[in-house]
Image (cartoon, rainbow, N blue to C red):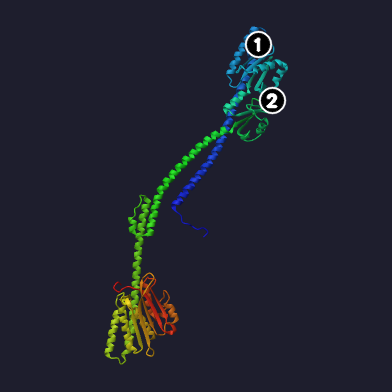
Amino acid sequence: MLFHKREYSLFSQLIKIVLVIYGLFLISFLILFLFLNHNMRSNLYDSYYRTIDYCLTETKNDLEIANRSVLSTLYNNPDLSQLSTSDHMMTISACESRLQRTLSSYLLCYSTVDGLFFYSERNDRFISKSRDPNTSFSTYFKTFLRSVDFAAFSRELTSQKSSFAFCEIDGSYCLVRMFAYNNTIGGAWVNVDTIMHDLEESTSKDTLCAFLNAPETELPVVNQAVDSNELQLLLGKNTQVVTYSGSKYLKFEIRPSFCQSDLLILMPYSHLQQTLELRFKLQGVFIVILTLCFLSTFILFSTRLRLPIRELYRISETVKESPQLEALNLQEVSRCKEVREIHEEVIRLLEHIDSLENQVLREQLLKKEYELLSLRNQVSPHFLINCLSVISSMAGTSVSRIVLKSMISTLAEHLRYTLSTKPFVSLAEEMHFVRNYYDLNSYRYPDSLLFQINIQGLCDNAAVFPSLVLMLSENSIKHNLSTSDKLSLTVTAFEEQSESGQVYVHIRHTDTGSGFPEQMLADLNNPAPTVEEIADGSRIGLYNIKKRILLAYDDSHTSILFSNLPHGGGAQVDIILPYISYQDS
C-alpha cells in the first residue's frame, strides 16, 4: 500500500475541520478586506477627483456668468453708453454711481469672481468693483489700460481666444478676461488664491495647487513654495500616488476649461490614510468580535460535543477492560440521545455475543462428548475381541474348568469396566484392571510375560480415563508377546510440577518388544493425526488414547509422546496429565 491508513480521533478531526473552516473564512475575509480597501482607495480617489472637478466647474460657471454680465453691460447698459458719449460731469457722476451699484449686484451673484471693471477711453473713466477693497488689482488694471494703445489693444482683445489669462501683480496672480466694444473695455478678474482656497476647502488645507505651462508666465502659479522642476516631472507620471519632498501625495492632474494651463493638485496621502485607518480599525474590531464569537461558539460546541465523545470512550474502555453486561448496566449514561442509543445497542450486542458464545460452547461440549463416546465404543469391542482370543486359545488346552471360569469372570468384570459410562476412574482402579489383564495373558503365555507397576505418591488417587494404561499394555502384548520370547512391561507414575506451580501426573509405559516402526512413530507424534495415518488403523487403540487426551484437556503442558528405547530396547509412551483428584473429577 502506498498510503498507511492511521487511526484518528473523532474529536481531533472535528477540531481540525473547524479550524480549517475558520482559516478558510479568515483568508477569504482578508482577501475581501484587501479588495474592499483597494476599492475604497479608488473610490476615495474618484470622490476627491469629482470634488475637485465640481469646484472647478463652479468656478468656470461663475466666470462664464461674469463674462456674459460684462458683455451684456457693454452692449446694452445705457449708463455705460451715456458715460462714453456725455461730457456733462453731473451725468457722468450719475452714470458712474449707477454702474457701481450694478457691479455690486453682479458680485453678489458670484462666489468666485473677485472683481469687475469698465474703462471708457473717451472720458478716461475707470469704474470697478471688487470684493476686497484693499486689492491692488483695480489700480493695476486702471494704470495698464491708460498706458496701452487703446485702439491696438481693443483689436487684440477682439481676436484673442475665449479664455482667462494669468496676470502677475506685486507677486500675486489673477485670472483676467477683457472685452472691447464701442471704445469701452470691460472685464472680470478672479484671484488665483481664491480658486486655490476653494480647492483647499474641498480637499485639505495642506493641498498643494499649481497651475503649470501657462503661456502668460514661465513660473508655476502655486499656493506654496515648491520646486518647479520637480513639479514638471510629477506632471508626466501616470500614477495616483506620488512622492514629493519625501512625503506621499495623491496626484490630480486637470486641465481647466477657463484657462490655458495645466492644474496639478497634490493632496497629502495622510488625509486618505486617516480615512483608511478608520476603516481598518472598524474592520479590525469586526475581526476581533467575529473571532471572539467564533471562539465562544467553538468552545461551547466542543464542550457539548466532548462530553458524549468521552462517554463513548468510557463505554469503549469498559467493554475492553470487562466486557460484562453487569459493568455496562451499572455505568451511568449521559443525557445525550445518541449516546444512550449506542449504549443500549452495545448492551444488546454483548447479550447477543454471550448467547452465541454459550451456544458455541454447548455445541463444542456436545461434540466432545460424542467423540469420547465414539472412542469408548471403539475401545470396548476391541478389548473384548482380544480377551475372547485369549480364552479361545486356552479352551483346547489343559487348563482346568476352574481356571477358565476364573478367566471368564475376570473378562466379565473387564467388560463391565470398559462399558461403564464413568468419564474418569482413579489410577489405582485402572491399574487393578491392568493387573487382571496381565493375569489373563499369563494364562495364555505362561512364563512369557513379566510386568512391574510402580505408582508413587498421590498418583493412586489421580483421575484418568478408563482403559488409558490398559490400552497401552494391550497394544504391547498384542504385537510383541509370544511363547518363544519373553516380554517385560513396566508402568510407573510420579508427580511433576511446572514453573507456574501446577502439579501433573507423569505416566510412563515401557516394554521390551520390537518398538514402533519409524513411519508409525512419526504419525503417532503428529500433533493432530488421523486414524488412516496410523498404520491403516492397525493400532486404533493408540490413536484413541491420543485423541481422547487432546479432546479432554486444553492445558498446554498436557502431552503424550511415543518413542523407542535406545539400542532396540522396545517402545516407550510418556503421558503427562494435570493432577485432578478422583473425588474432584
Q: Amino acid at mark 2?
A: Thr
Residue located beneath label 1 in the image: 83
Mark in the foreground, 1 or 2: 2
State which quadrant residue 148 falls in. Answer: top right
234 or 145, nearer to the observer: 234
State which quadrant residue 376 falls in. Answer: bottom left
Kindly state the secondary structure of the residue where label 2 is placed: loop
* Residue depicted at 28% across the width and 91% down the height: 400
* Residue depicted at 69% across the width and 22% down the height: 160
Horizontal side of residue 140 vs 356, given as left or right = right
Where is residue 500 drawn, in percent x and y?
Answer: 38, 69
Residue 489 against residue 61 in the figure, above or below: below
* Residue depicted at 44% across the width and 84% down the height: 567
267 or 86, nearer to the observer: 267
State which quadrant residue 112 falls in. Answer: top right
Number of the label disc, if any, that sits on residue 210: none
Sequence-wise, the earlier of marks 1 and 2 is 1
- Res 60 seen here: no
Image quadrant where one finds the C terminus: bottom left
Q: Between marks 1 and 2, how big is the CA–CA gap? A: 35 Å
